[in-house]
Image (spheres, rainbow, N blue to C red):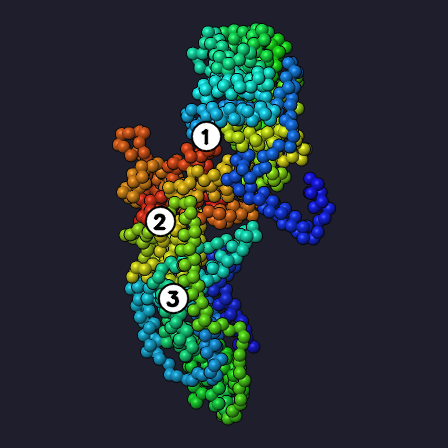
Amino acid sequence: MSENKNNKNNIGRRNFIKLLGGSAVVSSAALVGFKPKDEERGGTTLSLSQKGEMTYRQTPSTGDRVSLLGFGFMRLPTIAGNSARENANTIDQEAVNALTDHALENGVNYFDTSPVYCRGESEKSLGIALKRHPRNKYYIATKLSNFSPDTWSREASLKMYYDSFKELQVDYIDYMLLHAIGQGGMNSLHRRYLDNGILDFLIEERKAGRIRNLGFSYHGDIEVFDYLLSRHDEIKWDFVQIQLNYLDWNYAKQINKANTNASYLYEELQKRGIPSIIMEPLLGGRLAKLPDYLMGRLKQQKRDNSIASWAFRYAGSFPGVLTVLSGMTYMEHLQDNLKTYSPLEPLTEKENHLLEETAKLMIEYPLVACTACQYCMPCPYGIDIPSIFLHYNKCVSEDNFPQSSQDENYKKSRRAFLVGYDRTVPKLRQANHCIGCDQCSHHCPQTIKIPKELMRIDRYAESLKQETL
Amino acid sequence: MLKRIRTISAVLFMALITLLFLDFTGTIHTWFGWMAKIQFFPALMALNFGIITGLILITLLLGRIYCSVVCPLGLFQDLISKVASRNKKNRFYFSKAMSWLRYGVLILFVIAFIAGFGSFVALLEPYSAFGRIVSNLLAPLYQLVNNFFASLAERMDSYAFYEKEVWIRSISTFSIAVITLISIVVLAWRGGRTYCNTICPVGTVLGFLSQFSIYKHRIDTSKCNSCGLCAKNCKASCIDAKSHTIDYSRCVSCYNCIGKCKKEAIKYTPSFGQPKEESVKEQPVPEKAMVSNDQIDSSRRNMLTIAGTLLATSAIKAQGKKVDGGLAFIEDKKIPERQTQLVPAGAQNLRNFTRRCTGCQLCVSACPNNVLRPSTALTSFMQPEMSYERGYCRPECTKCSEVCPAGAITAVSREDKSSTQIGHAVWIEKNCVVLTDGVSCGNCARHCPVGAIVMIEMDEDGFDSKKIPTINTERCIGCGACENLCPARPFSAIYVEGHTMHRTI
């Protein structure tokens, strides 16, 4: 340190130039990091060092001090090297242990699992990993995942409940959830939890101390959410798990018609003083892999932060949020998330606005969620799929996307779209040559229905060419 | 004064007509498209009697000013001739008219026309010859320059310029253009308007008429000293200074002689109220050199053009290699063998088309979809025909019918065009990717603008088999969207066969 100080004081002209050169190298390295390929969660060029301590939030009912980062055990690493969600390989327990250890060391104390995750292996894996640490150092969350009709009976549901204790090797569970209520509507809720008395049973278990916090996770039919909240005074939910991210905040319906805006869900919980646990902060990874233009805007603000970190900061900035779950497969995911939340740097108003705008662009304009990963390439019929999406997204984001010939800048934007199209994509590789053989779609990690999107873009380009808008 | 007006208007005409062939955006056509339509032979072909009458009347009034102002090939020869005159002053001399050749060529021309041998007609017709030279030799250069600007614009994120594909549409027509250019340059270099007064059928016809024109150059024998300066500067070689006569059938009304004469002995006057021949004075006067800076070294330009074209082709190849990286190779499409040639909607029928088309290439230059190219078939040599390897006849485009000055492609509206059947699509089973690659396709049906292609089950009574296209020939207009967008390469699995008679559906 003292040497550094000396240097600082003795800055001569030469040193100054050296410093300048050095910072130039740094900034160019940061620029290299802009390449979409590196832009995965916690891309390798990003610095992974933490700034300080993990941010914690407290539950009102039990006073638990929960880390803002919660570890979701749904995408565990397998021996094949990818996540258990993408393949059927055996879970890599050593990697799980290493992740768990690193998480605990850095202040993560909330672990979320379910009897159904990773083909039923997740609870067991979590049990093994956590058994090596003192029980009071972490909170375990699991769920009563009686989706299948043959687990609807009281007996089968109870078996599932007790099995969780065995698999997790624990005698109490910190957070117990009714899993994914809302799917299947009120009918399903009745069958799964009400008619068979399981909800009453769980409330009893909470009294008995084998469940410390009782809550539910919600997807789908809003009637079920409202119904369960209406019974809050009687049941006293300790927490509720909802899907929240900057897209779902106001545009949940546009993403999935069955869903409800996170703004509504969160506000309803806030009204009742129920803490929210956040799932899908990245919307299935979609918010970690933004289209280039949107990514560039965020990078411009914070070069050194991953794109995923914006979504985590968004979710974490709500004061009523207890913890934000992240299904972390790789150490880099964990490190990046730790960095984001150690401590949380809440979004400024300006940043919040930027994300709102990002969401707006993503929703209001029909961007294709292509990350130019090139997995779909080469197309056997020579189509340059990523370039077509790139051009299309660019035009959409830059407002060169007229919707009618009456638009104010119709002529200009029409020309920009068509001339730019020929510039970006050679004629023979444009969307009109897509035959729809669909050999590409299953390669797409974003599950884009490529031929469908290409044909949509082709129809649009055609309507511009023929001026039939 | 007369000469200045003539020169300025001629340069304007030639420049704008040249631009008509170069401008692929269609902007120039909006304003100056008429310049092509007042060309003598195309107007005759278009049965544009108003224009023909006008041109005849002008010739009867003022002589062959058509040849020195309106005809772009005429001015082109003047430019060559002017360059030649820089090295050698007073290089012309009177020669006897080669009437047998002129009228011989004219008769051949008429016979060829009546016999429907359009290529011979197109070969000699001056405006078309000029068009071929510009569209084959100059246009690629122009497009390369445009593409350079387009790449600059791209870097500046501007959409002011867009890239244009540069390609030679027909080697034989390209060669004809080169040969025509060389012949014209040689003839003009040596003898000024030799072509106009020996070969050009339009020149012959107008020359015949101009003998009776009201306004003429007349030598005032009372002032003339028989110095012969006028004859030495007459690019039409039509002034006989010794006998003080002018062969009015060859005079193109360029007014060069008027300015040259130091004695002001040559006047351009109407035939009424003329005094008869008077005495001649002799007084040789030193002449001044006439040099202008804006002349273009044509032979050099010619060479550059050819070099540019070669460069263009190699550039295309290089680009082809560059884009191959992570992309599948795309084989070039080959031209299918069509039993009947395809000509654009507006042509009405092949007979009308081949008879009227003067092969000027204006439509070929104007076609934004790379569909039109000069034919190589003997009966329609140099006349345009359609093929769909590089693009198809897009529903919104009626460019060729707008520009055609000869009525070979009559004006059609978008609606007319989309209901005119110029041919019909034919499916070739053995090429179809549904069968060769075992994939689903239907790209032809998806892009058919008139819904003439229906995808049907491959199996006779299956309902879940792969689908193959079938064509409703009653609805098909022959635009070639299916052929162009067919994934089968090099030969498409669906191609368009032409019709001799276009019909409205």
Residues at marks 3 and 2, CA–CA distance in whole angstroms: 30 Å
Residues at marks 1 and 2, CA–CA distance in whole angstroms: 38 Å
Q: Are marks 3 and 2 on the same chain?
A: yes
Residue positioned 60% across, 26% down in the render: A106
The amino acid sitting under disc 1 is: Asn
Residue B177 numbered tag:
3
The amino acid sitting under disc 2 is: Glu
Mark 2: which secondary structure? loop
Residue that numbered label 1 is attached to: A82
Give me the chain letter of mark 2.
B
Residues at marks 3 and 1, CA–CA distance in whole angstroms: 65 Å
Residue A77 x %, y %:
47, 27
Front-most of residues B359 and B143: B143
- B328 lies above or below B246: above
**Residue A363 in sight here:** no
Residue that numbered label 2 is attached to: B331
Residue A253 x %, y %:
54, 26
Front-most of residues B385 and B488: B488
